[in-house]
Amino acid sequence: MFNKRTVCILMITFILVLTGCANEQAESKMDDKVKIGVMLSDVGLGDQSFSDSAFQGLIKARNELNIVFDYRELSETETYEKGLEELVKNDNDVIIGLGYMVQEDLEKVAKKYPKKQFVIIDSVSELKNVTSITFKSDQGSYLAGVVAALTSKSNTIGFIGGEDVPLINAFADGFTEGAKSINPSINVLVEYAGTYGDDKLGGSIAQDMIAKKADVLFAAAGFTGVGVLKQAQTQGIYAIGVDSDQYFYAEKAVITSVLKKIDVAVFQLASDLVKDGKVPDGHIEFGIQDEGVGLAPLRVVQYSEEQLEQIEKASQQFAD
């Protein structure tokens, strides 16, 4: 006969065994899932632009493809290299680095782990185990220039970039070219903030451009650009956002946004990984024709049928 104490011990042991089996099953199921690690760009979550868009792609992949993901922010790890190392050690199947600022550290870690798959978004690497994803940002910016030129009454518009680097220069060049396709004599002011994380500086640069008669401002500057949008609203002029639909940050000013669909690229990478067990090699470009870039809905300003046709015609030339 078992006494009460023996019975209790047996019950507890049985429960612990069941719990252990359940934990092992849960861990086994988790091990079977595709795992993606992401090193976010410098500002990190809440940038209302680059990192937030990538995060939306990860959430969609988790919900629709049943992947799991992990991420690191520079504010937590102090260096990109440390964050990337942590993501490798956590046994993620693919490690993604967001933005050209991450490239140097990502390549350093990729060389250290040649059998691990890495992805750099918004830059190009020559390493064999690094897939490069870029966007034809000049296409979206060209459309923004067309919209700005059709909207401007002062014949002066402005572009504010985060840093004076080739990636952001492409935004400025596309914007200028698009505007001049509508109005060859339009004045396009261009200035670089030198940072993606200072909304007050963005507001100050916007104020200077407004003083020079600019009445439409396009910012490709992360959180610095949010300051541009808000200053435009304060001063009663128009603005164009970037990366994600930024209308909701200045609803009286933002007429559209240039969409660099990082969420689409991240979701596509996750789809390839789930389907094929790996991501594609080499350099992949996303443009208007594959829905990688484009414009958010037009708001605030009422455009004529003729103007809408001009915008559509400009978009169609890239789609074709």
Image (cartoon, rainbow, N blue to C red):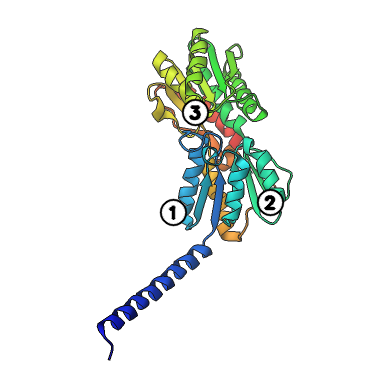
Q: Residue at x 40, y 24 (%)?
A: 250
Q: Which residue position holds label 1? A: 63
Q: Which residue position holds label 2? A: 281
What SS does tag 2 mark?
A: loop
- Which quarter of the picture shows residue 35? bottom right
Q: Residue at x 59, y 17 (%)?
A: 191
Q: Residue at x 44, y 24 (%)?
A: 255
The percent coordinates of residue 270 (x first, y second) are 55, 53
Amino acid marked by disc 1:
Asn
The answer for how far apart the CA atoms under marks 1 and 3 are is: 28 Å
Graded by Cα atoms within 10 Å as few (under 14), some (14 to 19) or many (20 or more), the crowding at tag 2 reads some
Asked if residue 77 is positioned above or below residue 128 in the image, the reply reads above
Nearer to us in this view, 16 or 173: 16
Quadrant containing the C terminus is: top right
**Closer to viewer: mark 2 or mark 3:** 3
The percent coordinates of residue 77 (x first, y second) are 55, 41
Number of numbered labels in the structure image: 3
Using the rendered image of the protein, determine whether residue 210 is visible from the camera's viewpoint. yes
Q: Residue at x 52, y 47 (%)?
A: 71
Asked if residue 7 is positioned above or below residue 280 in the image, the reply reads below
- Which quarter of the picture shows residue 80? top right
Amino acid marked by disc 3:
Phe
Nearer to us in this view, 275 or 40: 40
The percent coordinates of residue 144 (x first, y second) are 53, 25
